[in-house]
Amino acid sequence: MGALHEGHLSLARRARAECDRVIVTIFVNPKQFNNPDDLKNYPRTENEDARKLAPIGVDAIFVPDGGTMYPDGFATTVSVEGLTNKLCGAHRPGHFDGVATVVAKLFLQTAADRAYFGEKDYQQLQVVTRMARDLDIDIEVIGCPTIREEDGLAISSRNLLLSDRARIHAPRLNEAMEEIAAGLRKGQAMSALYPAAAAKLEQAGFTGIDYLELRGASDLELMEQADRPSRLFAAAWLAGVRLIDNIAV
Protein backbone atom coordinates (compact mmCIF):
# COMPACT_ATOMS: atom_id res chain seq x y z
CA MET A 1 0.00 0.00 0.00
CA GLY A 2 2.95 2.34 -0.51
CA ALA A 3 5.04 4.19 2.10
CA LEU A 4 7.76 1.76 1.06
CA HIS A 5 10.47 0.67 3.50
CA GLU A 6 13.36 -1.76 3.32
CA GLY A 7 11.07 -4.75 3.78
CA HIS A 8 9.10 -3.83 0.66
CA LEU A 9 12.24 -3.00 -1.30
CA SER A 10 13.71 -6.42 -0.47
CA LEU A 11 10.76 -8.00 -2.30
CA ALA A 12 11.40 -5.89 -5.39
CA ARG A 13 15.10 -6.83 -5.36
CA ARG A 14 14.26 -10.52 -5.06
CA ALA A 15 11.83 -10.27 -7.96
CA ARG A 16 14.36 -8.33 -10.03
CA ALA A 17 16.95 -11.07 -9.44
CA GLU A 18 14.61 -13.91 -10.42
CA CYS A 19 12.26 -12.52 -13.08
CA ASP A 20 12.42 -11.03 -16.58
CA ARG A 21 10.02 -8.20 -15.78
CA VAL A 22 8.96 -6.71 -12.45
CA ILE A 23 5.77 -4.81 -11.65
CA VAL A 24 5.29 -3.12 -8.28
CA THR A 25 1.66 -2.45 -7.38
CA ILE A 26 0.82 0.40 -5.01
CA PHE A 27 -2.79 0.85 -3.96
CA VAL A 28 -4.17 2.05 -0.62
CA ASN A 29 -7.05 -0.40 -0.50
CA PRO A 30 -10.16 0.99 1.22
CA LYS A 31 -11.70 -2.48 1.56
CA GLN A 32 -9.13 -3.62 4.12
CA PHE A 33 -9.59 -0.73 6.57
CA ASN A 34 -11.98 -1.10 9.49
CA ASN A 35 -11.60 2.52 10.59
CA PRO A 36 -12.34 5.32 8.09
CA ASP A 37 -9.89 7.61 9.91
CA ASP A 38 -7.09 5.09 9.37
CA LEU A 39 -7.81 5.13 5.64
CA LYS A 40 -7.95 8.92 5.55
CA ASN A 41 -4.64 9.26 7.42
CA TYR A 42 -2.74 6.52 5.60
CA PRO A 43 0.34 8.04 3.92
CA ARG A 44 0.30 8.48 0.14
CA THR A 45 3.92 8.76 -0.94
CA GLU A 46 3.92 7.53 -4.53
CA ASN A 47 6.62 9.95 -5.74
CA GLU A 48 8.94 9.03 -2.88
CA ASP A 49 8.16 5.35 -3.42
CA ALA A 50 9.13 5.68 -7.09
CA ARG A 51 12.40 7.33 -6.08
CA LYS A 52 13.22 4.41 -3.77
CA LEU A 53 12.39 1.86 -6.47
CA ALA A 54 14.43 3.56 -9.22
CA PRO A 55 17.82 2.01 -8.30
CA ILE A 56 16.26 -1.48 -8.34
CA GLY A 57 15.20 -1.09 -11.96
CA VAL A 58 11.61 -2.30 -11.78
CA ASP A 59 9.82 -2.19 -15.13
CA ALA A 60 6.53 -0.68 -14.03
CA ILE A 61 4.81 0.81 -10.99
CA PHE A 62 1.05 0.28 -11.18
CA VAL A 63 -0.83 2.87 -9.09
CA PRO A 64 -4.57 2.59 -9.83
CA ASP A 65 -7.12 4.87 -8.21
CA GLY A 66 -10.19 3.79 -6.29
CA GLY A 67 -12.55 4.23 -9.22
CA THR A 68 -10.40 1.99 -11.39
CA MET A 69 -10.28 -0.82 -8.84
CA TYR A 70 -13.85 -0.53 -7.58
CA PRO A 71 -16.04 1.09 -10.26
CA ASP A 72 -19.67 1.99 -9.62
CA GLY A 73 -21.72 -1.12 -9.00
CA PHE A 74 -18.78 -3.22 -7.85
CA ALA A 75 -20.41 -6.11 -5.96
CA THR A 76 -17.90 -8.96 -5.59
CA THR A 77 -15.96 -9.99 -2.48
CA VAL A 78 -13.37 -12.76 -2.29
CA SER A 79 -13.41 -14.49 1.10
CA VAL A 80 -11.08 -17.23 2.34
CA GLU A 81 -12.66 -19.23 5.16
CA GLY A 82 -10.74 -20.84 8.00
CA LEU A 83 -7.53 -18.83 7.74
CA THR A 84 -9.09 -15.43 8.34
CA ASN A 85 -11.05 -15.70 11.60
CA LYS A 86 -8.01 -15.88 13.91
CA LEU A 87 -4.94 -13.82 14.81
CA CYS A 88 -5.29 -10.40 13.12
CA GLY A 89 -8.55 -11.48 11.49
CA ALA A 90 -10.21 -11.85 14.89
CA HIS A 91 -9.38 -8.23 15.72
CA ARG A 92 -10.05 -6.73 12.26
CA PRO A 93 -13.35 -8.11 10.90
CA GLY A 94 -13.49 -8.08 7.11
CA HIS A 95 -9.85 -7.07 6.73
CA PHE A 96 -8.74 -10.22 4.95
CA ASP A 97 -11.78 -10.17 2.66
CA GLY A 98 -10.48 -6.81 1.48
CA VAL A 99 -6.97 -8.20 1.08
CA ALA A 100 -8.10 -11.29 -0.86
CA THR A 101 -10.36 -9.25 -3.13
CA VAL A 102 -7.77 -6.64 -4.10
CA VAL A 103 -4.93 -9.15 -4.49
CA ALA A 104 -7.08 -11.35 -6.73
CA LYS A 105 -7.73 -8.30 -8.91
CA LEU A 106 -4.05 -7.32 -8.98
CA PHE A 107 -3.00 -10.86 -9.90
CA LEU A 108 -5.42 -10.84 -12.84
CA GLN A 109 -4.66 -7.27 -13.92
CA THR A 110 -0.89 -7.73 -14.00
CA ALA A 111 -0.98 -11.31 -15.40
CA ALA A 112 2.11 -11.97 -13.28
CA ASP A 113 3.30 -15.56 -12.91
CA ARG A 114 5.10 -14.90 -9.61
CA ALA A 115 4.16 -12.75 -6.63
CA TYR A 116 6.45 -11.87 -3.73
CA PHE A 117 5.08 -11.31 -0.22
CA GLY A 118 6.90 -10.79 3.07
CA GLU A 119 6.63 -13.35 5.87
CA LYS A 120 6.17 -10.54 8.40
CA ASP A 121 2.48 -10.57 7.44
CA TYR A 122 2.45 -14.37 7.50
CA GLN A 123 -1.31 -14.73 7.85
CA GLN A 124 -1.76 -12.52 4.78
CA LEU A 125 0.77 -14.67 2.92
CA GLN A 126 -1.21 -17.82 3.73
CA VAL A 127 -4.53 -16.21 2.78
CA VAL A 128 -3.20 -15.00 -0.58
CA THR A 129 -1.60 -18.38 -1.33
CA ARG A 130 -4.84 -20.26 -0.57
CA MET A 131 -6.94 -17.78 -2.54
CA ALA A 132 -4.81 -18.14 -5.68
CA ARG A 133 -4.81 -21.94 -5.39
CA ASP A 134 -8.55 -22.21 -4.79
CA LEU A 135 -9.41 -19.90 -7.71
CA ASP A 136 -6.93 -21.55 -10.10
CA ILE A 137 -5.06 -18.29 -10.67
CA ASP A 138 -1.88 -19.35 -12.46
CA ILE A 139 0.63 -17.65 -10.18
CA GLU A 140 3.33 -18.81 -7.75
CA VAL A 141 3.16 -16.96 -4.43
CA ILE A 142 6.64 -16.70 -2.91
CA GLY A 143 7.20 -15.88 0.76
CA CYS A 144 10.30 -13.82 1.59
CA PRO A 145 12.03 -13.51 5.00
CA THR A 146 11.10 -10.73 7.41
CA ILE A 147 13.60 -7.87 7.29
CA ARG A 148 14.68 -6.68 10.74
CA GLU A 149 16.51 -3.79 12.32
CA GLU A 150 19.87 -4.59 13.92
CA ASP A 151 18.18 -4.93 17.33
CA GLY A 152 15.69 -7.51 16.01
CA LEU A 153 12.62 -5.31 15.56
CA ALA A 154 10.70 -6.29 12.43
CA ILE A 155 10.74 -3.39 9.97
CA SER A 156 7.30 -1.85 9.62
CA SER A 157 5.78 1.46 8.58
CA ARG A 158 4.22 1.57 12.04
CA ASN A 159 7.66 1.80 13.67
CA LEU A 160 7.79 5.46 12.65
CA LEU A 161 4.87 6.10 15.02
CA LEU A 162 6.91 5.01 18.06
CA SER A 163 8.38 7.65 20.35
CA ASP A 164 12.13 7.52 20.94
CA ARG A 165 11.51 5.93 24.35
CA ALA A 166 9.10 3.33 22.98
CA ARG A 167 11.48 2.50 20.14
CA ILE A 168 14.11 1.50 22.69
CA HIS A 169 11.72 -1.04 24.24
CA ALA A 170 10.09 -2.31 21.04
CA PRO A 171 12.70 -5.07 20.41
CA ARG A 172 11.59 -6.77 23.66
CA LEU A 173 8.73 -8.26 21.65
CA ASN A 174 11.06 -10.26 19.41
CA GLU A 175 13.28 -11.14 22.38
CA ALA A 176 10.32 -12.58 24.29
CA MET A 177 9.29 -14.56 21.24
CA GLU A 178 12.76 -16.00 20.74
CA GLU A 179 12.82 -17.10 24.39
CA ILE A 180 9.49 -18.88 23.95
CA ALA A 181 10.70 -20.50 20.72
CA ALA A 182 13.81 -21.80 22.47
CA GLY A 183 11.64 -23.45 25.11
CA LEU A 184 9.29 -24.90 22.52
CA ARG A 185 12.21 -26.46 20.67
CA LYS A 186 13.16 -28.21 23.92
CA GLY A 187 9.69 -29.74 24.15
CA GLN A 188 8.12 -27.30 26.61
CA ALA A 189 4.45 -26.38 26.33
CA MET A 190 3.23 -22.97 25.19
CA SER A 191 1.07 -22.53 28.28
CA ALA A 192 4.12 -22.96 30.51
CA LEU A 193 6.17 -20.40 28.55
CA TYR A 194 3.55 -17.70 28.09
CA PRO A 195 3.50 -16.15 31.61
CA ALA A 196 7.20 -15.19 31.66
CA ALA A 197 6.96 -13.69 28.19
CA ALA A 198 3.87 -11.67 29.09
CA ALA A 199 5.59 -10.37 32.22
CA LYS A 200 8.65 -9.38 30.18
CA LEU A 201 6.50 -7.37 27.80
CA GLU A 202 4.60 -5.69 30.63
CA GLN A 203 7.87 -4.67 32.27
CA ALA A 204 9.01 -3.21 28.94
CA GLY A 205 5.94 -0.97 28.78
CA PHE A 206 3.65 -2.99 26.52
CA THR A 207 0.07 -2.26 27.54
CA GLY A 208 -1.77 -5.15 25.95
CA ILE A 209 -1.29 -8.40 24.05
CA ASP A 210 -3.83 -9.11 21.33
CA TYR A 211 -2.30 -12.55 20.86
CA LEU A 212 0.87 -14.49 21.57
CA GLU A 213 0.20 -17.93 20.12
CA LEU A 214 1.79 -20.99 18.55
CA ARG A 215 0.02 -22.06 15.36
CA GLY A 216 0.53 -24.51 12.53
CA ALA A 217 2.68 -23.12 9.74
CA SER A 218 0.29 -24.19 6.97
CA ASP A 219 -3.19 -24.19 8.55
CA LEU A 220 -2.76 -21.62 11.37
CA GLU A 221 -4.44 -24.00 13.81
CA LEU A 222 -3.71 -23.34 17.48
CA MET A 223 -1.00 -25.58 18.98
CA GLU A 224 0.27 -26.25 22.49
CA GLN A 225 3.59 -27.89 21.56
CA ALA A 226 5.83 -27.62 18.51
CA ASP A 227 5.37 -31.20 17.34
CA ARG A 228 5.04 -30.22 13.66
CA PRO A 229 6.12 -27.22 11.58
CA SER A 230 4.76 -24.18 13.37
CA ARG A 231 5.15 -20.46 13.89
CA LEU A 232 4.91 -18.22 16.92
CA PHE A 233 2.69 -15.18 16.33
CA ALA A 234 2.42 -11.99 18.37
CA ALA A 235 0.53 -8.71 18.28
CA ALA A 236 1.05 -6.31 21.17
CA TRP A 237 0.54 -2.62 21.95
CA LEU A 238 3.35 -0.25 22.87
CA ALA A 239 2.71 3.46 23.37
CA GLY A 240 -0.48 3.26 21.34
CA VAL A 241 1.15 1.42 18.43
CA ARG A 242 0.18 -2.14 17.50
CA LEU A 243 3.28 -4.18 16.67
CA ILE A 244 3.10 -7.61 15.02
CA ASP A 245 5.73 -10.28 14.50
CA ASN A 246 6.09 -13.99 13.84
CA ILE A 247 8.95 -16.46 13.82
CA ALA A 248 9.35 -20.04 12.68
CA VAL A 249 9.58 -22.78 15.33
Image: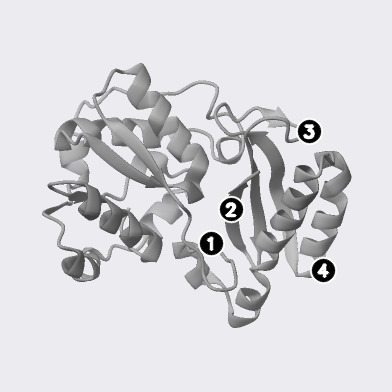
In the drawing, what numbered circle is on residue 245? Answer: 2
Q: Earlier in the sequence, mark 3 or mark 1?
A: 1
- Residue 39 placement, left or right of 25: right
Identify residue type, mark 3: Glu
Judged by depth in the image, the label closer to the viewer, 4 or 3, is 3
Query: In whole angstroms, how far apart are the C-alphas of marks 3 and 1?
Result: 25 Å
In the drawing, what numbered circle is on residue 224? Answer: 3
Query: In whole angstroms, how far apart are the C-alphas of marks 4 and 3?
Result: 25 Å
Query: In whole angstroms, how far apart are the C-alphas of marks 2 and 4?
Result: 19 Å
Asked if residue 84 can be seen in this view, the reply is yes
Seen from the viewer's position, the closer of residues 3 and 178 is 178
Q: Earlier in the sequence, mark 1 or mark 4?
A: 1
The residue that label 1 is drawn on is 154
Q: With respect to residue 125, does 236 lie above or below?
A: below
Judged by depth in the image, the label closer to the viewer, 2 or 3, is 3
Contact, CB < 8 Å: mark 1 with mark 2?
Answer: yes
Query: In whole angstroms, how far apart are the C-alphas of marks 2 and 3?
Result: 19 Å
The residue that label 4 is drawn on is 203
**Local SS, label 4:** helix
Q: Earlier in the sequence, mark 2 or mark 4?
A: 4
Q: Residue at x 24, y 65 (%)?
A: 49
